[in-house]
Image (tube, helix red, strand yellow):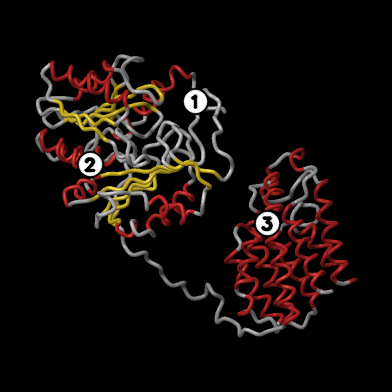
């Protein structure tokens, strides 16, 4: 796998230099590369308690990305997924700590415990006041003697940073940090492991599988599962959280992206988690955000914190650190009514025509059945969603079938256009809506079906700007409509299929995403929109027999 790096040896130092250079003067680093890699505030506050944390790199923006007012005073960075050395941690403590003392926040991994622990002892021997707080929020193994420190560590950073910024003494800062660490629990899920830059990826899971309870270094999960729907997954994960989370009536939730999960997936998972019994007790939401990542891992973690007034105030306090996922108090979702004019006026009176209903059902079922094959075809020349686009439109029409004016052709076309415009994404939905609107208008003016469909195609050409040979769905629709007028539906279906097949030999596209591709990438692959049109005409012809 390719990565944007210079070389593996300088990966962490290059990244730190990039972070500091882009901070606008807010951050600095200690000298001492490559053994000592410490990021700290450029303008320290020596009269306040220092909050220092760190660990292996690869979890960005944790930990160096959270250095700033109200959060960390300094972060000590190790190699990728490896603890920093004792000397590096000691350097960070000594550079950040004044007379007020230091709270050292450590994730519960053996390397971190040893290196941070020994550095704390050496700092104390040099006269520094250091309190160590261990975070062990992982619930993957309920009986684990030493649970891992995961994304819940960030709650501890914020609580300690808030207390330190408010001028609290060392004992109070440490006490709040320990109380936070005792009140937070985390569980992770992923469908892929992490790829170390400069190394080949390890494929541990089959398609459709996920690992529940894995760590942030690519360690295997405690359970390999078949990945369910997001709502079922959220319920399964939420049910695993023990006390103090299970018994709390007021919670904070951090939804953490482990690296490469898309924003759409993270939003879906967030909705699903908030809909669980546990989620309904969430008062403060942080994320969904990539805050404690595992390089490019495709996964997420949920961190719940049992709140009290002090912890809620700490999480809501402001910080200028841009990477921090600011807590929001959850409110009832606001749904506003559609403005007048969007729905196109009053809904038409439903009516029943058995033949029309049968043909609509035939087309809908055919497009839904072709979803996967059309997506696969589109993946070769586009973004892989043509099948889903047409299938979603078909599902919307079938869901409303009994509410359509089946016995009124003009009104039926207008209703189909409105539904497809709302339910079908991208340009396809708009073009289909234009076609049906123009067809309906022609029918209302006295045209028969062949002439009305020809008017619809002409309007699509006029507005969309495509024509024959431009490698679009019109390459199937134009010959189909011409054959419909001359010879009926059977001939129209054959013409549509022939037109779609001709697009496989076209080495240019006049419009759409395919117009950005080279001829060699197009040749041999028919246009998926044209194939969808052919599929629809074939279903119509079959339903007319």
- For label 2, the residue is 182
Q: Is residue 26 above or below residue 446?
A: above
Nearest to the observer: residue 420 or residue 108? 108
The label on residue 197 is 1
Marks 3,1: beta carbons within 8 A: no
Q: How many marks?
A: 3
Residue drawn 37% across and 43% down? 187
Q: Quarter of the image holding residue 89?
A: top left
The tag on residue 288 is none
Of label 2 and label 1, which has the lower sequence position?
A: 2
Q: Earlier in the sequence, mark 3 or mark 2?
A: 2
Q: CA distance from mark 2 to mark 1?
A: 34 Å
In the rendered view, does 127 fall on the left or right side of 27? Answer: left
Graded by Cα atoms within 10 Å as few (under 14), some (14 to 19) or many (20 or more), the crowding at tag 1 reads: some
Q: In front of the other: label 2 or label 1?
A: 2
Residue at screen point 16% across, 48% down: 310
Q: Residues within 10 Å of mark 2 (few under 14, many from 20)?
A: some
Marking on residue 371: 3
Q: What residue is shown at x 68% (from left), y 53% (from top)?
A: 372
């Amino acid at each position: 796998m390719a990565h944007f790096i210079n070389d593996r040896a300088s990966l962490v130092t290059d990244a730190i230099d990039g972070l500091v250079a882009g901070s606008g003067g807010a951050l600095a680093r200690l000298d001492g590369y490559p053994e000592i890699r410490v990021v700290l505030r450029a303008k320290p506050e020596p009269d306040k308690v220092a909050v220092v944390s760190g660990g292996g790199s690869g979890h960005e923006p944790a930990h160096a990305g959270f250095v700033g007012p109200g959060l960390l005073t300094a972060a000590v960075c190790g190699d990728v997924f490896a603890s920093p050395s004792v000397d590096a941690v000691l350097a960070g403590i000594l550079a950040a700590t004044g007379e007020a003392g230091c709270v050292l926040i450590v994730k519960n991994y053996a390397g971190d415990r040893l290196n941070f622990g020994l550095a704390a002892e050496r700092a104390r021997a040099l006269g520094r006041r250091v309190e160590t707080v261990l975070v062990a929020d992982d619930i993957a193994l309920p009986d684990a003697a030493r649970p891992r420190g995961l994304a819940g560590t960030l709650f501890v950073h914020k609580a300690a940073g808030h207390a330190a910024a408010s001028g609290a003494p060392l004992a109070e800062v440490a006490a709040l940090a320990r109380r936070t660490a005792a009140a937070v629990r985390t569980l992770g899920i992923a469908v892929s492991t992490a790829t170390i830059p400069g190394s080949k990826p390890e494929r541990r899971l089959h398609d459709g599988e996920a690992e529940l309870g894995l760590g942030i270094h690519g360690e295997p999960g405690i359970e390999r599962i078949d990945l369910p729907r997001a709502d079922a997954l959220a319920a399964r994960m939420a049910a695993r959280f023990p006390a103090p989370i299970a018994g709390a009536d007021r919670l904070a939730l951090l939804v953490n992206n482990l690296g490469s999960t898309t924003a759409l997936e993270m939003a879906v998972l967030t909705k699903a988690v908030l809909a669980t019994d546990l989620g309904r007790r969430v008062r403060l939401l942080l994320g969904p955000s990539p805050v404690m990542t595992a390089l490019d891992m495709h996964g997420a973690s949920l961190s719940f914190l049992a709140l009290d007034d002090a912890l809620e105030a700490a999480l809501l306090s402001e910080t200028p650190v841009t990477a921090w996922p600011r807590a929001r108090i959850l409110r009832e979702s606001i749904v506003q009514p559609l403005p007048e004019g969007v729905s196109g006026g009053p809904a038409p009176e439903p009516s029943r025509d058995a033949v029309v209903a049968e043909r609509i059902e035939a087309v809908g079922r055919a497009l839904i059945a072709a979803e996967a094959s059309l997506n696969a075809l589109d993946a070769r020349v586009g973004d892989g969603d043509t099948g889903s686009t047409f299938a979603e439109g078909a599902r919307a029409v079938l869901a409303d079938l009994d509410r359509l004016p089946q016995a009124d052709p003009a009104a039926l076309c207008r209703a189909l256009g409105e539904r497809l415009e709302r339910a079908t994404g991208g340009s396809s939905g708009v073009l289909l809506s234009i076609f049906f609107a123009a067809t309906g208008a022609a029918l209302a003016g006295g045209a028969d079906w062949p002439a009305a469909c020809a008017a619809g195609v002409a309007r699509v050409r006029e507005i969309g700007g495509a024509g024959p040979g431009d490698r679009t769905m019109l390459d199937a629709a134009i010959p189909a409509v011409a054959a419909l007028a001359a010879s009926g539906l059977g001939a129209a279906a054959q013409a549509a299929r022939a037109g779609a097949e001709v697009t496989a030999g076209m080495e240019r596209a006049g419009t759409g995403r395919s117009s950005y591709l080279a001829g060699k990438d197009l040749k041999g692959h028919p246009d998926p929109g044209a194939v969808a049109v052919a599929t629809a005409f074939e279903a119509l012809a079959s339903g007319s027999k």
